[in-house]
Amino acid sequence: MADLKVTLSGWELDNPLIPASGTFGYGYEFAELYDINMLGSFSFKGTTREPRFGNPTPRIAETPSGMINAVGMQNPGIDKVISEELPKLARCFHKKVIANIGGFSVEEYAECCAKIDKVEQVGLIELNVSCPNVHNGCMSFGTDPLGVSAVTKAAKAATSKPVYVKLSPNVTDIVPIAAAAAEAGADGISLINTLLGMRIDLRTKKPVIANKMGGFSGSAIFPVALRMVYQVYEAVKLPIIGMGGVTSACDVVEMMLAGATAVEIGSANLVDPWACPHILEELPAVMERYGIESLKDIIGGAH
Amino acid sequence: MKQGIFTITGHEALTKDVYRMALAGDTSAMSAPGQFVEISLPGFFLRRPISVCDYDASGLVIIYKVVGRGTEAMAAMKEGEKLDVITGLGNGFSPEKGGEKPLLVGGGVGVPPLYHLAKRLVAQGARPEVILGFNKAEEIFYEKEFAALGAGVTVTTVDGSAGVKGFVTAALPDAYSYVYSCGPMPMLRALYAATQGTAGEFSLEERMGCGFGACMGCSIMTKKGSRRVCKDGPVFEKEELAWQI
Ligand SMILES: Cc1cc2nc3c(=O)[nH]c(=O)nc-3n(C[C@H](O)[C@H](O)[C@H](O)COP(=O)(O)OP(=O)(O)OC[C@H]3O[C@@H](n4cnc5c(N)ncnc54)[C@H](O)[C@@H]3O)c2cc1C
Ligand SMILES: Cc1cc2nc3c(=O)[nH]c(=O)nc-3n(C[C@H](O)[C@H](O)[C@H](O)COP(=O)(O)O)c2cc1C
Ligand code: FES
């Protein structure tokens, strides 16, 4: 029997499949489609201290083999997530969930982590450091090792839950950023967030997206994501949640060979709402085809 | 909502760039006129949202305009070919609210979702009045089909080459019990202002990531707060829209 179990900072998952933040809401939409308890876990919609409506529409554009989004972290705010969304989720999901936290200042990240710390349902915190830093000319926290370090330290001080830092790929070299997170005490690294991209509408001759640019995701970014997971695995000795363009069981295995302990699946859920169950179903056959008995054994196997 | 494989059983051009496609497959997830489907096209990442024009237990009809590469690829498809379609998306119109003499106003490719609605309204004993707005005579489609249902039909064209000259608001009847509409935003806004005092439902359009409520790609602000066009809509009560007149 194929062994799909993996462990993230002491938390054993039945399998490495985790729907990625922003593509799975707070879970219950998908619970109407299939039993989401078959998933390893999932990462909920990026949540901030204050409620946010997000960006004006159009927020979505298509690319060859991918898409661009500029949703702008629309979410009901951390308090409502804890008091309303998570109790609603508890009715259909009996596993622990990953809390994806965003922020625009170090204090904001810390406050959200402190609030999440008390929530039994949360297995680990995933810090989205791709948000603009309002105290630093709106440069993303995640493009600067000092920014990543400050946010990670503040989060670690605010919670005893494992803290995973989700890195932005929009940097010249991902390695010093991952190293800064590790030095600041991160328990793991999540990568990659979306690449900055853009499309122009030939009819209007203007950017498709109201915000002009947005986050590029989907199968098109898989090789970039895989390369970065590989680099980070070499550089830091922390568990990695790999993501970016994963759409099949073969992609999952490839990500794990590059160094991922678990794998998040994002945009694929939007075009095939049953993407995760399909991948999970495929996984044992793919493992058998490539002579893999236990997924644990292949993590970082390509190095 | 359901995903299924549909077979193209009919495909014809209604005008220079508007096509009617009949698809056979499982429609059991559909519950109301004005709902839409998301069609996966080979070689394209995102699905295309298209309103259901008509449906029964064995299949559905869509009418679409070629505006870009996806719809261009669709136009080249032949009878017998298969499409991966997610059905039963969105809330749809509420025929039960229509009353005696409901008014249906469609503009361009906003016309199709009103067809099954008109059918339902006639079936429940109402006498719908339909206004179909186009730019010019060559763009007109489905005038006869609406008339064949027993609805009163008025066509408007912006250039006056057929029917009443002007926008749909140039042809509003004196009295109507409710107003249903789908079409381009400027038309909906003009109609919203011109039909003050009468309740109604408007179907909106947004670029979509998923079409079923997962990505927040299609959010609009309404009087009741943030709403997703794909899941909470595409049909919204006029009263809910926070539009300035
Ligand atoms: C709920 C809903 C119902 C619709 N019903 C119909 C219908 O019955 N008949 C019809 O002709 N059209 C309808 N549309 C518009 C239709 O979805 C677009 O014309 C179509 O997606 C264009 O695809 P394309 O590949 O040719 O264009 P491209 O511009 O090449 O497409 C690129 C991307 O933008 C999206 N896109 C482009 N234009 C629109 C648009 N106007 N609205 C939403 N997404 C867009 C595409 O889906 C695709 O993801 C509907 C849209 C929505 C949201
Ligand atoms: C519509 C959409 C919304 C997203 N929102 C968030 C978010 O709130 N927080 C976050 O950390 N990542 C967010 N992401 C990024 C994804 O979690 C993921 O890192 C990225 O899309 C790459 O994976 P994919 O190619 O499988 O989609 C979002 C992605 C999409 C497509
Ligand atoms: S298109 Fe994804 S939520 Fe509406």
Image: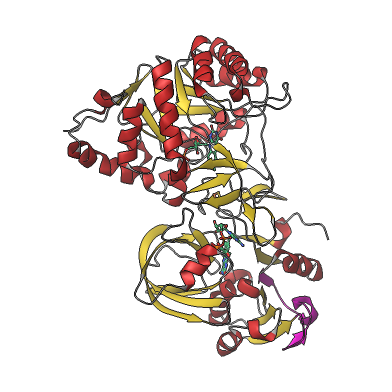
- Image vertical order of residue A178 relative to residue B170, above or below: above
Q: Nearer the viewer, residue B239 or B36?
A: B36
Look at the image and tell me whether residue B61 can be seen: yes
Q: Position of residue A155 (x, y in %)?
A: 56, 15
What colouring does the structure picture have? secondary structure
Q: Position of residue B191 (x, y in %)?
A: 76, 70
- Image vertical order of residue B185 relative to residue A230, above or below: below
Q: Is residue A97 magenta?
A: no
Tell whether B227 sits left or right of B81. right
- Image vertical order of residue B197 relative to residue B210, above or below: below
* Secondary structure that dominates the magenta span: loop
- Image vertical order of residue A234 relative to residue A288, above or below: above
Look at the image and tell me whether residue B174 can be seen: no
> Dividing the image into 4 quarters, which one contains the N terminus of chain A?
top left
Q: Position of residue B140 (x, y in %)?
A: 64, 83
Q: Which residues are magenta?
A: B158-182
Residue at horizontal 52%, vertical 77%? B19
Q: Position of residue A201 (x, y in %)?
A: 64, 57
> Dividing the image into 4 quarters, which one contains the C terminus of chain A?
top left
Q: Nearer the viewer, residue A162 or B115?
A: A162
Residue at horizontal 68%, vertical 86%? B137
Tell how many labels.
0
Tell whether B81 sits left or right of A145. left
Residue at horizontal 49%, vertical 54%? B46
Q: Nearer the viewer, residue B28 or B160?
A: B160
Residue at horizontal 24%, vertical 23%? A297
Tell whether B217 sits left or right of A186. right
Snapshot quadrant of residue B243: bottom right
The residue furthest right is B245
